Image (spheres, grey):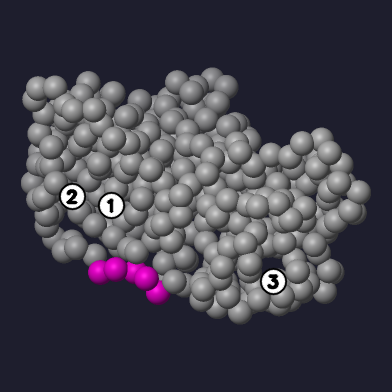
Amino acid sequence: MNTQTRRPTMRLLMALIASFAMVAAACGSDSTSESSDTTVGGGDAPPAEAPVTQGPGGEEATASSEIALDADQIGEVKSGNYSAALLWHTSGAFTDAVSAGARDAFAELGIEVIAETEAGFDAARQANDVETVLAQDPDIILSLVIDPVSGAEAFRPASEAGVQLVFLSNAPEGWVQGTDYVGLVTDDLAAMGIAAADLLCEHLGGEGKVGFIFHDAAYYVTNQRDQAFKSWLNSSCPGIEIVAEQGLADPAAAEEIASALLTRYPDLDGIYAPWSAGPADGVLAAIRAAGGDDVAVVTMDLDTNVSLDMVEGGNVVGIAADEAYELGRTMAYEAAYGLLELEVPPFVVVPAISATADNIVEAYKNSLGIDPPAEVLDVIGG
């Protein structure tokens, strides 16, 4: 779920949550709840069993590296003179990176991209995009479904017309993979949670007290990332204690929640924020207001503010991200699988990335296929 636009920025998550009507009630914003599942350090920990990513219906995850075609299969696709349309939920660096991966793969496969749209997080506008694009008779459509409920009807004409549909992160509600659509691709959610836990554990030298702010809504992308962070930190870094945890339904409440954490635990060594644009910004504001220069922050998804804080030696010590370009490549290849009538795994994930101040340029290139923002490059002298 990446920084500027997608699998967990504030704008995307709030749009998805609103359209899904799945927002859960937030925990009380005036206080924090004690963790009921805390591991306190001391002694040798048993071997940790790493959490694994599952699809929204519990599907087993398949690595995107397994989605490949041989020369003969690529030649067969090229001979078909196929066309594709990219129907995105919004525009931005993340979507640009996914599009770049898809376009490069389609070029390799001899598939013409005849349309690319962005719906501005408006499900009705996305439905209109589907109708408009279908008039151009594409063989393939790649998209992120803004509202799985209304999207089931919006994309139905494309499915019934035999268009190869591949979705990013969300599929239309009630649809059957392999029958109604080709496949679903997203991040290795558990790996992102593990990466964030490892970054915090390493920075704190395996010891300390931390606060855990999780996304308090029924959305499998953020839920799995958050819980993977918590379980992996508890099992693999027993010297770190999660002293309190608090749910976050409204990203605007992050500063208030973090302030309560810091007031209750003035000796807090670190805080986990569920994603960057919004929640992590609020956490950083609370830390600065409290004068908590030594409080380490880890979060998800590359974003200018958190990246800048990190390279400036601020509170952010690590960011877990995804490979957005690889998302696009994988989606395009899955569409080719559909054309060739090859079996497609039901749920495919791309690798996670651990970003630090030392590898921020490489992280941006691997994730988004671009250099970091100018502000970040100015600090590191890039």
Crowding at label 1, few (<14), some or many (≥20) Cα neighbours within 10 Å?
Answer: many
Callout 2: few (<14), some (14-19), or many (20+) C-alpha neighbours within 10 Å?
many
Instruction: Name the residue: 91% across, 49% down.
Output: 79
Where is mark 1, residue-wise? 214
14 with respect to 229 (left or right): right
Q: CA distance from mark 1 to mark 3?
A: 36 Å
Name which residue lies at 85% across and 52% down: 112
**In magenta stretch: residue 24:** yes
Q: Position of residue 248 (x, y in %)?
A: 27, 58
The residue lying at 86 percent from left, 46 percent from top is 76
Identify the image quadrant of residue 290: top left
Q: Magenta segment, which residues?
A: 21-25
Residue 245 numbered mark, or none: 2
Q: Position of residue 278 (x, y in %)?
A: 38, 52
- Image-based side of 236 in relation to 187, left or right: left
Which of the pair 143/56 is nearer the observer? 56
